[in-house]
Amino acid sequence: MFNRMRGAAAPWSGEAAGPEEAGLSQVSILDQDHFLRMLYLEQKRTERSQRRFVLMLLESENLLANRGSGEALEQILLAMSQSTRETDITGWYKRGSIIGFIFTEIGSADGKTVANALLTKVTNALSQTLSIDLINQIRLSFHVYPEDWSDNGKGNPSGTVLHPDSAQDGARKKGPLLVKRLLDIAGSVTGLVLLSPVMLAIAVAVKLTSRGPVLFRQNRVGQHGKRFTFLKFRSMYTGNNHAIHKEFVTRFIAGDAPAGAGEAGQTVYKLQKDPRLTPVGGFLRKTSLDELPQFFNVLMGEMSLVGPRPPVPYEVDRYAVWHRRRLLAVKPGITGLWQVTGRSKVTFDEMVRLDLKYARTWSLGLDLRILLRTPRAVLIGDGAY
């Protein structure tokens, strides 16, 4: 057997093997659905154990497609049997063109170091079994989970590779997602036009009551870790120290933030009596009017009307592995399930679970229900501090 694999396996049968190849005919490889399921389960294991794994993709449509290439496939699997362990997982990542290999529990070494070591090991194994012509038709790529999200702001290129379920879900919902984008454009344009007098009045109030620009621009993390410039009406004094917020965020994400008392004795998880806020800023925060410039972010396609709130980079640095899933499936939004079901009255883990629930159950109908509930949440200021 090429490998002992967890989960159901689908035996691969190629051309009839000669006597010297009799052992290879017993090679087993997980089918695509089972392999992707194992990839998902391995991610969940990593989220619990913090032990990373590497997904290696071996791609060659010429060699792996079902066109009488059985001998080449068996040679590849034989070579890879020298580079994998019984605990590793092998299967079709994409039937007929890409084989996936999950190297489980790789330890605490740097991801790039491990990937380079595996590249050397796999290349040596392939070169001992395959001809140069066959090797030149193979493309290898390595993806470490959890990903080392780039600081260059361009996002996480491995996001859709390590999370093919998100990509497949997006493909299935291509039509509804197009409608969602059209609604975002229509809604943001309508909002900017109808609320332009309100926005002008806010701009004047901000400018007259404190020194500094009208708009507050901040680097935020969007879908797949891609950064963008997030817009709000400035609600804080310029030149303030963000250390107080960083400390609160660190404790909030860790579940150690002190819970304060809101109106009617409600428990809230929010930095209250923030000394950085201007007199006008406190009102803008309470009424969420400081969020109105984000219609421009929606119009640019960086955000949606409905979705998870985009975090600042230092928040993401404090995330546990499973927290990052909230940034994968959908674009960040102005309002969302969290905003209309509690806001600052829920813990960080509860907020993330609400975001994941939204991504998992998303539909145009859900977006419309959240949009209809948003005005009430804004007017009564429920959970806003």
Image (tube, helix red, strand yellow):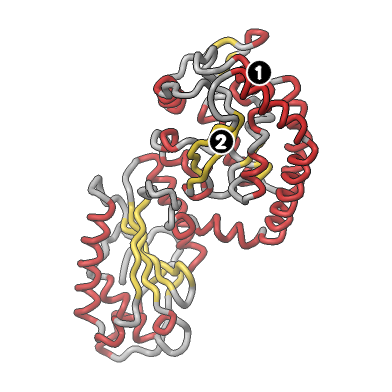
Q: Is residue 21 above or below residue 189?
A: below
Q: Quadrant of residue 70?
A: bottom left
Q: Is residue 130 above or below residue 117?
A: below
Density class for disc 2 (Cα within 10 Å; few <14, some 14-19, many ≥20) is some
Q: CA distance from mark 1 to mark 2?
A: 29 Å
On the image, the x and y values in percent for residue 13 come to 42, 81
Q: Quadrant of residue 28?
A: bottom left
On the image, the x and y values in percent for residue 207 come to 61, 24
Where is mark 2, residue-wise? 353
Does 257 sit left or right of 369 as displayed?
left
Under mark 2, the amino acid is: Arg
Q: Earlier in the sequence, mark 1 or mark 2?
A: 1
Residue shown at 54% from the left, 22% from the top: 211
Q: Quadrant of the N terminus?
A: bottom left
Q: Is residue 7 above or below residue 272?
A: below
Under mark 1, the amino acid is: Phe
Do the residues bearing badges 1 and 2 touch, measured as CB atoms within 8 Å?
A: no
Q: Is residue 385 visible?
A: no
Does 105 sit left or right of 128 as displayed?
right
Residue shown at 28% from the left, 52% from the top: 111
On the image, the x and y values in percent for residue 321 come to 41, 41
Q: Is residue 198 above or below residue 332?
A: above
Residue shown at 77% from the left, 35% from the top: 195
Q: Is residue 287 visible?
A: yes
Camera-nearest label, 1 or 2:
1
Density class for disc 1 (Cα within 10 Å; few <14, some 14-19, many ≥20) is some
Q: Secondary structure at mark 2?
A: helix
Q: Quadrant of the C terminus?
A: top right
Instruction: Identify the residue at the far top of this view.
Output: 265
Q: Secondary structure at mark 1?
A: helix
Where is mark 1, residue-wise? 283
Q: Quadrant of residue 169?
A: bottom right
